[in-house]
Image (cartoon, helix red, strand yellow):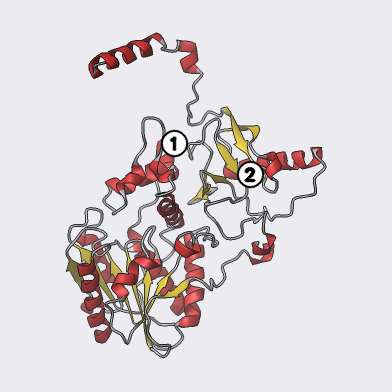
Amino acid sequence: MPKSYELKLREAEERRRKPNKQQQEEIYKAIEGKSQKIMLGFDHPESLQFEMQLTWVEDTWTIDQLHDHLLSEVRRIDAEYRRKPLQGNYSQKYVWFDRFLLRPRVQGRELTLQDYGIEPGFRVKISPFYQSEMVWGQPWPFDFRKERPKDQVLPAEDPDLLLRLDKGGAGLSTRVIFFPWLGGSSSAYIPVVQKMPKDVACYALDMPGRGQREDADGYPSGLFAVKVIAMTLAKELRRGSNYVFAHSQGSHFAYYVVKLLRSNYNVDVKALFVSNFAVPSSMAPLELDTLKKRQALCVPLRIFTHLVKGGWGCDPKLAYKSHMGYQAYQSQELWPVARSLIIDHWITKDFPLPRADEPLHCPIVAFYGKEDPAVSLAQVKQWQYLSSHPDVFKVIQMDGAHMWFQNSSTMCEALATELGKLLRKF
């Protein structure tokens, strides 16, 4: 059958099956300021015998209200079937949807089910599960040995955070700490480290939720992450000459950590090297006044679409959605990257932190990929005013876009060469 004739038959059938006006009005659509009842699925957090339970909720409920309701439903089931009391720690009121954690609030505003695009028939959980995002202080219902006690949910040293990438000896006194970018992993710096001088010890932050640390407890906020990183680095950086390199959004974490190391732990960094990102104080307040803007912040597909269109170097497949509803980021191939991007997207929403315009007590040098569509050269030059020595600040321009050295052996070698020169200078 010719394709054109087949298309005409399909269009005729669609017109015949067109729903009437009453049926069209029954289709759910979130309306800002109007509460609607929707039915959600949920699982018992500590028993596989009670999966896919159903309950009615209001789409304007906050995440805390949803958690309280789900927990009451679980306790009702336990009482009905005479089960033992829950053993896990649910005091943090964590709720998961689509394998990622629903943040209850951002910059002081409570988020609702509407903001996350949750619709009738969707499924939520109050305990983590296979390949879901893990978070500090979460319940571990099937292995309580991993669960943090209620009195140990504050920031603490992360023993697996700092990963050494070079193969040098233990006595090296010069260290470089590499901070990853949005969704980046420690292994991405290996090609750079392989070209670094042999008398330099190279470490990278092996952040939770990616690579070998897929099941490690993540950090619930940006300030929390800064405190954990500073605690962990302070122990290692007591002696010798220490330098920090950070690319993209890692530059902001590096700035806050370097400042905290000096103020809280009396640990000085010789120099900070940043790459392709604006200064911390330039981050504009989030726009949260409309449902559309809040969904742009909260719905993963919209997050990825913004990153791809903005030129941040993300895989375009992350923003793909088929006409049948398939979203590529949920696939087995892309989910590990998508999860790390979602985690890092959320832990930066605390920023800027207070006093984000204070100069550091160390010099700063910036790198810049000249074809970057997301960050301008003028924005990168603003780091000069955060340097302890503005007169020695400079921007080293490199060929490439935002991710100018990733997946390029030539540019990785060029970055290592420039870093070697800067280490000798400072």
**Label placed on residue 228:** none
Describe the element under mark 2 as helix, strand or loop: helix
Q: Residues within 10 Å of mark 2 (few under 14, many from 20)?
A: many
Q: Where is residue 150 in the image (x, y as percent from the top left)?
A: 68, 62
363 sits left or right of 104 in the view: left
Instruction: Kindly state the secondary structure of the residue where label 1 is placed.
Output: helix
If the image is split into quadrants, where does the N terminus sit? top left
> What quarter of the picture does the C terminus occupy?
bottom left
Q: In this view, does 336 lie above or below 48?
A: below
Relative vertical location of residue 121 with respect to residue 300 in this rendering, above or below: above
Above or below, 36 against 169 in this view is above
Name the residue located 22 percent from the left edge and 78 percent from the top edge. 417
Q: Is residue 202 left or right of residue 102?
A: left
Please give left or right for residue 248 compared with residue 326 in the image.
Answer: left
* Image coords of residue 410 (percent x, y): 20, 69
Q: Looking at the picture, tell me which residue is in the foreground, 382 or 18.
A: 18
Q: Residues within 10 Å of mark 1 (few under 14, many from 20)?
A: some
Which residue lies most toward the bottom here? 171
Which quadrant of the view contains residue 193? Answer: bottom left
Let me know if residue 390 appears in the view.
no
Label of residue 291 in the image = 1
Label ID, residue 67: 2
Image x and y of residue 278, in percent = 29, 61
Front one among 360 and 116: 116
- The amino acid sitting under disc 2 is His
What distance separates the C-alpha of mark 1 from that of mark 2? 21 Å
